[in-house]
Amino acid sequence: MTATRFDQLIDRRATSSEKWEKYADSEILPMWVADTDFMAPQPVIEALHQRIDHGVFGYTCTPPELNRLVIERMQALYDWQIEANDLVWLPGLVCGLNLACRTVGESGSTVITPAPVYPPFMSAPRLSDRSLIKVPLKRGEDSRTVIDLEALEAAITPAAKLLLFCNPHNPGGTLYRREELEALAEIIIRHDLIICSDEIHCDLILEPGLIHTPIASLGDEIAARTITLMAPSKTYNIAGLGCSFAVIQNPELRQRFQRVRKGIVPDVNLLGYTAALAAYRDGDEWNRAQLNYLRTNRDYLVDAINAIPGLKLDPIEATYLAWIDVSAACLENPPHFFEQAGVGMSPGRDFGDDRFMRLNFGCPRALLEQAVDRMRRALLNELPA
């Protein structure tokens, strides 16, 4: 494989990196939290330098150009017409999940979410004094893991007000097809629910020919019931700058959302806005190169993991996160076992299924190959003395 900018090994130790500080005093490779080890696009870095050189860092507001870029992006990519007033800028996507839970329903009402799923989907309802119902995902004949619509409908009660949904799905990397989203939208409308759709990985589609579809883009009726959460953070590796947004086209729902966040959730900081603006304006070429690199990492990983006895990895359509089935390895404590082998992954139990481990392959190939080799050696009892 020809060397690329993504092969560069950047030392992130001693940089207050959450990912790398977790294992700061060990030789464990951090393959857990969902940020990449790639340097951000050069236009983003240059824009940040220019803003810092200005030297004044006072209170800020949303750049009108950023609103315009997002509006144009939604139209160009998804044929989805939104307006500037529909956008609510946030300092992170997780706070958007929590705000959605506080916005919809009342204390004691029910939130439904698929499982396994990104941990804040399960913590946000409880933190908002809501009950939580987890609906199991199901594995289809094509090895795609999707929400079980029959189980979803059976779980809906009069107390259910909100569905938390993740597309592309984290973990697992499923990209929902348009017809699947249409079936889901029909259930939401018929049962008078609101959906909060986390679509933060929408720019990280790995499977050629697949296209992301925001559920709110399907029509006015579902749009009026949707809080869509997006961000440039995962795509361009700028999560530490804290800039996300919600698209809420229903004015009444948006006003409730804004009222709940007022005085509690701060505005986006000026460097977050600066990075987001540069990323959406000038970062697409960089992301195309990144996607090509991630595809090769994914293809290598799927083949390598499935060649290791006791492990199984289904195809990954989107994201840079692999959901590895370790159940056949019969490990008493999978997270500890792999950490002892020198690989730090996210425990499946945090997502609702302890038969799995989540591995972040958004890293230079050399690092990924080293991690896979350590896993193979451990499972074959070949750890060096």
Image (cartoon, grey):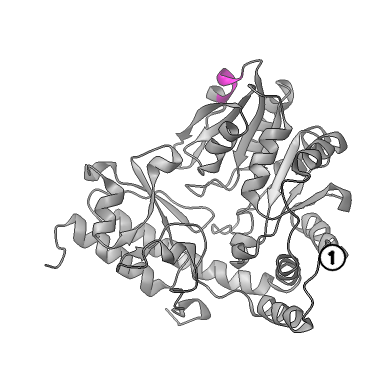
Verify whether residue 142 appears in magenta: no
User: Label 1's element?
Assistant: loop
Relative horizontal placement of residue 45, taking residue 339 as reference (left or right): right
Q: For the residue carrying disc 1, how many other residues have a C-alpha within 10 Å: few (<14), some (14-19), or many (20+)?
A: few
Span highlighted in magenta in the image: 152-156
Image point (73%, 74%), residue name: 282
Q: Where is residue 74 in the image (x, y as percent from the top left)?
A: 78, 55
Image point (74%, 57%), residue name: 77
Relative horizontal placement of residue 204, taking residue 189 as reference (left or right): left
Question: Can residue 307 be seen in the rendering of this structure?
Answer: no
Question: Can residue 242 be seen in the rendering of this structure?
Answer: yes
Relative horizontal placement of residue 23, taking residue 175 as reference (left or right): left
Q: Position of residue 298 (x, y in %)?
A: 44, 61
Query: In which quadrant is the C terminus drawn?
Result: bottom left
Q: What residue type is labelled 1?
A: Pro
Image point (50%, 81%), residue name: 4
Query: In which quadrant is the N terminus drawn?
Result: bottom left
Residue 334 position (above or below residue 113): below
Residue 120 position (above or below residue 37): above
Query: Between residues 267 and 276, which one lies in front from this camera angle?
Result: 267
- The residue indicated by pointer 1 is 63
> Residue lying farthest top?
158
- Dominant SS of magenta comes to helix
Image point (32%, 68%), residue name: 25
